[in-house]
Image (tube, rainbow, N blue to C red):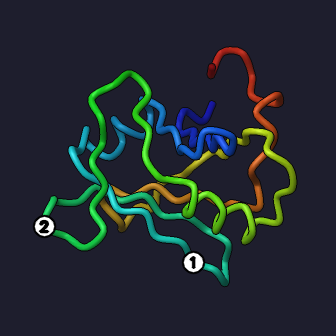
Amino acid sequence: MNDLILTFDLAEGTIVLNQGIIKTLGAPKHVQISINDQTCQLMLRACDIEEDQAIVVEKEEMPQVGGRRLLKRISNLAGWTGQESRFVYGYTVPHLDSVVLFDLKDARPISDLPEYCE
């Protein structure tokens, strides 16, 4: 079972990080989001506030980051249509600490998310 789930709420303009991601990243106060247009991957990395484009991670059960411009870019890159929310499973890379990767082309409608993950 993969417990690294990133949810894209297109209607609200937010990206929701689940607790599996937060734990894997070491409960960071800030993250960076990088998108590789060629591989259609999103990288989420724990960072310090001083780093470029650091995003504050809210102290909530399911923290939200992002914004409408970022989601529009992701949606266009991945070829999504409509406003249905989507989710994608993430994975870690052994030689990269405090990093989770997501293949945006693997994102599925939120209605496909198993109930145990909600």
> Residue reaching furthest left?
50
Q: Is the C terminus in the top left, top right, bottom left or bottom right quadrant? A: top right
Quarter of the rendering containing residue 87: top right
Quarter of the rendering containing residue 76: bottom right
Is disc 2 placed on a helix, strand or loop?
Answer: loop
Between 81 and 7, the residue placed more toward the observer is 81
The x, y position of residue 109, in whole percent, is 81, 39
| Residue at the image position 63 percent from the left and 44 percent from the top | 8
| Residue at the image position 82 percent from the left and 28 percent from the top | 111
**Residue 50 disc label:** 2
Q: Is residue 74 left or right of residue 93?
A: right
Q: Which sits earlier in the primary sequence, circle 1 or circle 2? A: 1
Is disc 1 placed on a helix, strand or loop?
Answer: strand
Q: Residues within 10 Å of mark 2 (few under 14, many from 20)?
A: few
Q: Which residue is mark 1?
A: 36
Please name the amino acid that badge 2 sits on: Glu
